[in-house]
Image (tube, rainbow, N blue to C red):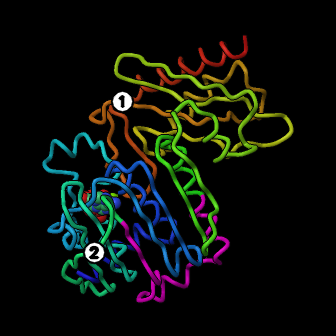
Amino acid sequence: PRLINQIAAGEIIERPASMLKELVENALDAGATSIDIEVDNAGVKRLKITDNGHGILRQDLAMALSRHATSKIHDLDDLEQIATLGFRGEALPSIASVTRMSIQSREQDADQAWLVSSDGNNITTDPQPIAHPVGTTIETRDLFYNTPARRKFLRTDTTEFKHLDQVVRRMALSRFDVAFKLSHNGRVVMHLPAVPADDPRRLKMVCGDNVPENSVYFDEQREDMRLSGWAGLPSFSRSQADMQYFFLNGRLIRDKTVVHAIRLGYQDVLFHGRHPVYVLYLEMDPARVDVNVHPTKHEVRFRESGQVHSFVFRTLQAVMSRSAG
Ligand code: ADP
Ligand code: MG
């Protein structure tokens, strides 16, 4: 199982940032409202994430480290309508196979927290009692210490940290209602309190100067689809092509249909060659989307992409004409 997990880890875990993405997704899936991340040497030496989610039961702790142990999918119907960010049960065993890892967790109804640790060789300790509030702390050390070939692909701490920072920013944009804190080598580098979805402070703290002055918040619902978020026009002085985020049911996606619909919605107000600036959230019945395409690629398949296209296009067109007029 160790080898299989290491092979799977190659698909999912390329660098500290991909590890962090999986761990933050798990915290969000557990209903956390506060996520605290500490890293040393860009997460290669040490990465620690603490959440206040519902925690893991003692009997599930050791199992979470073995392959395909997911609590999120129970039958084929669940697979047809995935409402969680994770669903394959691959992340923890993959991470465990390429790091020295420990998990401390207290389940919400348990009267005690438990600790398990593993050393990358799938040697996992029996749960030990430990003091920890409701929620989970996962700590990894020495990423790829046992797979030197992969360690060689790691870049400088500066580069790896940039990737980590990107992950935290994306996650922070996906959930304004969750507080995030990021510390690097003992210094707090990002501290984002939870705010309401329409509060521009989170947007400013995450995207800084990339947020155009003219950005407007909107929230439109039609039948079973809801599109909300921030849309703005790029300034003339600078390129803001990188501020384009589209979240589908909390998951950042890249989709041709969506990109096309957005461009079309902007077409009356966008000068030639400029890029729209947006942070958008589409919510719809998970049964109408297939997210089961690839574990890390941000791809989805809409069952009725025509409906999604016209809803996104029409909504943005209306928002743009309102804000222009
Ligand atoms: P998946 O997210 O695909 O279910 P993972 O390997 O990421 O698989 O996690 C395995 C399981 O461990 C999850 O299904 C969940 O039950 C549990 N788990 C992992 N992280 C957390 C967490 N932070 N809080 C609560 N449960 C967690
Ligand atoms: Mg997961």
Residue at (51, 71) in percent of width and height: 16
Q: From where the camera sits, is residue 89 visible? A: no
Mark 1 or mark 2, whichever is nearer to me: 2
Q: Is residue 245 visible?
A: yes
Above or below, comparing residue 92 to residue 195 in the picture: below
Residue carrying label 1: 284
Mark 1 → mark 2, Cα distance in angstroms: 41 Å
Q: Residue furthest top?
A: 325
Q: Is residue 148 magenta?
A: yes
At mark 2, the secondary structure is: strand
Is ligand 1 closer than 8 angstroms to the Cβ of mark 1?
Answer: no
Quadrant hosting residue 113: bottom left
- Residue 9: x and y in percent read 37, 73
Residue at horizontal 19 percent and vertical 55 percent from the top: 109
Q: Residue at x 73, y 29 (%)?
A: 233
Report helix, strand or loop for mark 1.
strand
Q: Callout 1: few (<14), some (14-19), or many (20+) C-alpha neighbours within 10 Å?
A: some
Mark 1 or mark 2, earlier in chain: 2
For the C terminus, which image quadrant?
A: top right
Residue 190, quarter of the rendered image: bottom right
Which residues fall within the magenta stretch? 137-165
| Left or right of 199 on screen, residue 129 | left
Above-or-below relation of 205 to 315? below
Task: Tell me where residue 218 appears, x and y as whole percent.
Answer: 56, 22
Is 284 within the magenta?
A: no
Quarter of the figure that contains the N terminus: bottom left
Residue linked to disc 2: 130
128 is higher (above) or lower (below) than 225:
below
